[in-house]
Amino acid sequence: MMNVMIVEDETIMRLALSTLIDWEPNGFRIVCEASNGRQALEYIKENGGIDIVITDLKMPVMDGLELIDELNQMTGTTPHVVILSAYDDFEFVRKAFKRGVNDYILKSEMDPNVVLDLLNRIKHDCEVEQTISRQSGEIRNGERVRLKQQTIREWLEIGVGSQFDPSILENLNMRLEWTHITVSLIRIEGFAQVQERYGSSIGEFVSSVVKSIDQVLSEVGTGEVISWNTYEYVVLLSFRTSSLMYVRQSISQIMDQIIFVLKEYINIQVTIGVSELCGELKQIPEFYLQARKNADLRFVINKNRIIYPEDAEYFLKQSGETLIGKEQALLDALKEGDEQSVLQELDNMFTLIKRSASMGNEVLRTRYMELLMILVKFMYDNGFVNNKEMNKIESAYQMAWQVDSADKLQAWISNLAQQLLQEMGKKAGQMNRVVAIAQAYIMEHYDEEITLGKVSAFVHLSESHFSTLFSKVVGKTFKEFVTKVRIEKAMESMKKEPYLKIYEIAERTGYASTEHFSRVFKKTTGMSPNQFMRSVSK
């Protein structure tokens, strides 16, 4: 049962609210009524136990805004505040919103169903908060883990700022020291099969991988892991010595244990690229890139193993001029989707490869494997790898080691790149069609309740994917586009039917609240609905 307090200086309004709905059968109980904010505040401080405060804004002694300020300063759990608003209270409502209040009831539109829906939503939110409170220890730990992973990702991407405070390691319970750090990139092999096996439960797979790795790190007492994406995971390890022999031995033991656990309990195999020993946390981004490049060598050294910096150095010395680091022009051409440029850059790569011919066929094949690795990484990074493409890639690897003709292999690689461009074109066209369907739906249903969830479900995409795609194609966010359509339709109605009331136009364009419609209209057009109607009627 939720305890409700009504704060209103008008007796009639208090009576209207208290008899508006069947409170107790719906899970609510009015425990107190006050005629001003001071009375309400004193009751709450003395008795507590109030879950929801429904308060007027304009009252004697202490008004609603002052009451909200006082409640915000209280320690512990404070009531959820709902304000009673009149049409001419806009400035007060705006100030209330700035104080953290998001729920309001228009005095002129106190529909029982609307009020009950609002209260039920608050009740649901409070129940969630209570659940969180009961599990506060676990939730706090979960929040700490989330912040920890976000912090580590920022370190890897942009580094550590000059104002970094080492105490954050302790505050976030990180199993890391400030110095002597290594970065390892763990890449899952055969991920297409993993995706097929888990399907829509891929999130559970990611969670299992992170938990398994974290369990190993917890047992050895050092290291943190984050999921970089569904098939790559980054591990940071730190040591209290810079002894390379000790560090290498420790890394080997830890990584071997991780490989064993992932194989034994999740049935996956991995390749791990390891960086050199990093002097300070500030150097992490460059060492992360080194670990990634070492992991990338799985395509040309061997998969299902640990690749240390010395392994990579030895391989590159033995195999002539590597293509790694010379691929940017090819990647740019692929991103642009320019077939002629792609083929030209491939020819440039083929020319570089042929310079290694004097070093023997094995080295020559290795260079082609590197080129395949570059193409495959691009496909992974841009979401073009599925079972069909994986089969093509496996065929390419086999051909690279078996074919006797470099020209034949080059033709095969060029064909693979052309197929990739075709797939990219198809995907872009499909995505544009999805957005066009969503736009048509919005144009047809703008006068109804339109949510991101409803439209994303209509086009069979997740909310996050649809939101990103929509913004990219349209150049506006989903919310901005819906607002644009509604306001344009409102302006059309005003021009064609100037005799309509503002509330009628609001209802026609999907706004349940005239006040909300007026705010959005003015923000979008620079004038109020009444001003616009006067301007078009001249």
Image (spheres, helix red, strand yellow):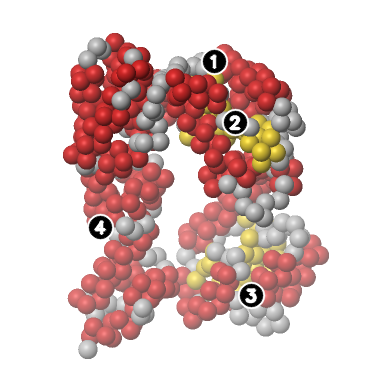
Contact (Cβ within 8 Å) of mark 2 with mark 4:
no
Q: Residues within 10 Å of mark 3 (few under 14, many from 20)?
A: many
Q: Nearer the viewer, residue 467 or 483?
A: 467
Residue 146 x, y percent position in the rendering: 61, 42
**Measured Cα–Cα span from mark 1 to mark 4:** 51 Å
Is 455 on the left-hand or right-hand side of 415?
Answer: right
Q: Quadrant of residue 102?
A: bottom right
Residue 421 to residue 520: above or below? above
Q: Residue at x 74, y 47 (%)?
A: 167
The amino acid type, in three-letter code, at marker 4 is: Met
Residue under the image location 57 percent in, 74 percent down: 95
- The Cα–Cα distance between marks 1 and 3, rounded to whole angstroms, is 60 Å
| Distance in Å between CA atoms under marks 1 and 2 | 26 Å
Which of the pair 310/80 is nearer the observer?
310
**Label annotation for residue 65:** 3
Helix, strand or loop status at disc 1 = helix
Comparing marks 2 and 3, which lies closer to the viewer?
2
Q: Where is residue 152 drawn, in percent x and y? A: 60, 41
Q: Where does label 2 land, which residue?
A: 276
Circle 4 sits on which residue?
443
Closest to the camera, between mark 1 and mark 3, is 1
- Lower position in the chain sequence, tag 1 or tag 3: 3
Image quadrant assignment for residue 143: top right
